Image (spheres, grey):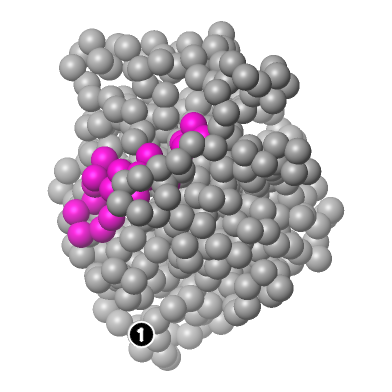
């Protein structure tokens, strides 16, 4: 077998010494650079900069999609250290990472970029990414009107809207995220279903949707949904493989007083069970509720962490809960602060990985996948661990 299932890196030495076990040619080996993408494979890179979310997806035919490019300015120690270093901005590191891994497709470009929602830790690196490589189509939850659910004069939003308008004037493509669609974000050979955004959720039938949010003008100011609750959610399918990602979508209903605020649960129920799920809102207390966990039942959880509060202990406990769904599972985090580790060690000790780029590699056809963790402290792409949750 090509890989060694790892827990917190404790078996890395054994993996490095296990050269006596034959390894199939061209597979990932601990201590060596990550092998390039290969035609027919689906690679999902969760990029760890310590400053926000960014995911690069390379489809079976080499088509590409990036979801978010965060660049939070929250200082340490509240945020994690910048990775690989603070010598460049997070968006520059993301752009360089994408160019490096898209080279195997023959054309280092992004066919599409999905903005899950409009917060700095998801969008403020976009501008540097756009300088690093061409973006074919930009999709966000709000185009062309950025006043829903309420107007904002936040500097980061003004900067994003200005970027969008400049892009349109230059002939660039931008589209509003269409809930229920399965043809807006295309990776030929795979399917991306748009599950939810702005309080609208796919029903699971055709392209039909239903609205959860009441009319904004009927709500008290304190009840108006925030930006996180409007996040775009998707399900990706490739053969038997399934993947769920939902930005900062939340399941919080304020103790049941505002049940319509929980968009994450119906989105997860529409998605159904998947192999890999990304913990929404970085594994924070207001997301990844019990019914979300029950609906998704993933073998692999990925936490895109960058703050001392990521993840919350209650969310991590739900991910590990055998009461919510039975069976083994691995939980990977792109980062973990010492304070979080110290406060929740009885849970964080069970993490499969605590830091690094988390790369999900799906074999041609989707019957098999593995999770590769690579070093985020340099641009070496050195493999730190390889886990095989499911193999033929």
186 vs 359, left or right, is left
216 vs 66, left or right, is right
What residue appears at the point 57 percent right and 28 percent down from the top-left corner? 214
Q: Which residue is mark 1?
A: 392
What residue appears at the point 36 percent right and 33 percent down from the top-left corner? 177
- Choose between 190 and 300: the one closer to the eye: 190
Looking at the figure, which quarter contains the N terminus?
Answer: bottom left
337 vs 4, left or right, is right
Q: Is residue 181 magenta?
A: yes
What residue appears at the point 30 percent right and 11 percent down from the top-left corner? 166
Q: Is residue 285 magenta?
A: no
Q: Quadrant of residue 114?
A: top left
Look at the picture and state if 25 lies above or below 255.
below
The x, y position of residue 326, in whole percent, is 63, 78
The kind of secondary structure element at disc 1 is loop
What residue appears at the point 50 percent right and 26 percent down from the top-left corner? 118
Q: Residue furthest left?
A: 106
Look at the picture and state if 34 lies above or below 304.
below
The x, y position of residue 355, in whole percent, is 59, 55
Stretch in magenta: 179-200
220 vs 210, left or right, is right
Look at the picture and state if 307 lies above or below 167.
below
The x, y position of residue 117, in whole percent, is 49, 31
Q: Quadrant of residue 369?
A: bottom left
Q: Residues within 10 Å of mark 1 (few under 14, many from 20)?
A: few
Q: Main secondary structure of the magenta part?
A: loop
Residue 318 visible within the image: yes
């Amino acid at each position: 077998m090509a890989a060694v299932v790892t827990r917190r890196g404790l078996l890395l030495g054994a993996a490095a010494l296990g050269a006596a076990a034959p390894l199939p040619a061209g597979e990932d080996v601990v201590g060596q650079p990550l092998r390039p993408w290969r035609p027919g494979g689906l690679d999902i890179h969760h990029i760890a900069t310590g400053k926000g979310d960014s995911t690069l997806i390379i489809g079976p035919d080499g088509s590409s999609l990036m979801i978010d490019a965060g660049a939070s300015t929250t200082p340490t120690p509240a945020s994690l250290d910048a990775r690989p270093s603070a010598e460049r901005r997070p968006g520059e590191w993301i752009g360089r990472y994408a160019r490096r891994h898209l080279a195997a497709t023959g054309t280092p470009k992004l066919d599409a970029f999905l903005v899950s929602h409009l917060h700095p830790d998801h969008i403020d690196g976009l501008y540097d990414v756009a300088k690093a490589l061409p973006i074919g189509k930009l999709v966000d939850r709000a185009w062309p009107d950025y006043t829903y659910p309420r107007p904002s004069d936040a500097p980061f939003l003004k900067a994003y809207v200005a970027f969008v308008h400049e892009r349109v004037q230059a002939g660039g493509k931008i589209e509003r995220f269409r809930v229920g669609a399965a043809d807006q974000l295309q990776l030929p050979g795979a399917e991306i279903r748009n599950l939810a955004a702005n309080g609208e959720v796919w029903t699971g039938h055709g392209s039909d949707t239903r609205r959860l949010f009441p009319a904004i003008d009927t709500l008290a100011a304190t009840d108006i949904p925030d930006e996180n609750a409007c996040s775009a959610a998707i399900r990706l399918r490739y053969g038997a493989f399934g993947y769920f990602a939902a930005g900062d979508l939340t399941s919080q209903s304020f103790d049941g007083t505002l049940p319509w605020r929980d968009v994450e649960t119906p989105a997860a129920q529409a998605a159904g069970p998947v192999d890999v799920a990304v913990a929404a809102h970085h594994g924070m207390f207001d997301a990844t509720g019990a019914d979300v966990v029950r609906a998704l039942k993933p073998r692999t959880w990925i936490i895109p962490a960058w703050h001392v509060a990521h993840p919350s202990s209650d969310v991590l406990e739900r991910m590990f809960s055998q009461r919510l769904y039975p069976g083994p599972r691995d939980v990977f985090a792109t980062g973990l602060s010492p304070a979080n580790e110290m406060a929740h060690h009885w849970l964080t000790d069970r993490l499969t990985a605590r830091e690094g780029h988390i790369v999900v590699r799906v074999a041609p056809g989707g019957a098999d996948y593995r999770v590769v963790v690579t070093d985020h402290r340099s641009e070496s792409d050195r493999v730190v661990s390889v886990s095989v949750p499911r193999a033929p």
